[in-house]
Amino acid sequence: MLSQSLQIRMAAGTLAAAIGLCALAAPARGEVIELIDKTKMSGKIIHYYDGVYSIETNNQTIKLPREKIRSITFQTPPARPEFATPEKTFDRWRKAMTDGSADRLVECYALMYQGVLATQMGLGKEADGFKKMQKEIEGTKFEIKGTSTKGETAMLKVQRQKGDETETGEIAFVKENGEWKMLPPQ
């Protein structure tokens, strides 16, 4: 039978090797876990129970006791270029509407409204709400007339023309994680 100190050293060596492998093949985003020995690894925390974190990294799951972790830092994904300006976000919205891509359309809105919009558009069942929106803007031309930006908010002035009818309105935007997202009309 192995002595307790030898078992502890073997377990620590196995843990260090697993962490070393995980750190080399870390995912592009997720949580950064710093251990008490200042080793860092990237992964996704998938479970926590009874003082033990289950962390997924490189398609494998490792378990780390809370006592071995110095800190956990949460990272957000990098901003996508298609949301770099209010104009680009609006263009993505317009293309998603034309192409019939409800998921891409919902992504154009601020995170706190995405679930509500998906529900209103009936994305869980039949896409009735989305189809009605598509039919409503069919044959409509949009022209951006101007943008005003103030810090993390912006207003996009858009002219909408359908047949002989012309209407100009404003669309509010907010910057989330470096991306400009639309706010629903108030």
Image: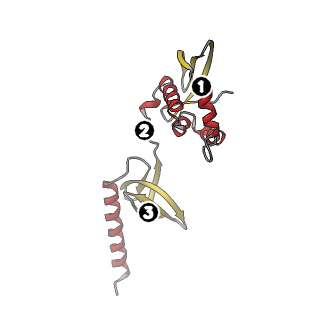
Asked whether disc 2 touches disc 3, contact meaning CB atoms under 8 Å apart, the reply is no
Which residue reaches farthest bottom? 1
User: The residue under label 2 is which amino acid type?
Assistant: Pro
User: The residue under label 1 is which amino acid type?
Assistant: Ile
Separation of marks 2 and 3 at Cα, in angstroms: 29 Å
Q: Position of residue 140 (x, y in %)?
A: 57, 21
Q: Nearer the viewer, residue 122 or 110?
A: 122
Above/below status of 41 relative to 171: below
| Residue at left offset 45%, top offset 54% | 44
Q: Residue at label 2?
A: 78
| Residue at left offset 32%, top offset 54% | 25
Q: Residue at label 3?
A: 68
Q: Position of residue 60 (x, y in %)?
A: 39, 62
Per the image, label 2 sits on a secondary structure element best described as loop
Q: Seen in the image, is 58 located left or right of residue 148?
A: left
Asked whether disc 1 touches disc 2, contact meaning CB atoms under 8 Å apart, the reply is no
Q: Please identify, in this view, whether the residue under mark 2 or under mark 3 is nearer the observer.
A: 2
Q: Residue at label 1?
A: 137
Q: Seen in the image, is 19 located left or right of residue 177?
A: left
How many marks the image carries: the answer is: 3
Report which quarter residue 136 is drawn in. top right
Per the image, label 3 sits on a secondary structure element best described as helix
Separation of marks 1 and 2 at Cα, in angstroms: 32 Å
| Residue at left offset 62%, top offset 47% | 125
Separation of marks 1 and 3 at Cα, in angstroms: 56 Å
Task: Give the mark nearer the N terminus: 1 vs 2.
Answer: 2
Task: Give the mark nearer the N terminus: 2 vs 3.
Answer: 3
User: The residue under label 3 is which amino acid type?
Assistant: Lys
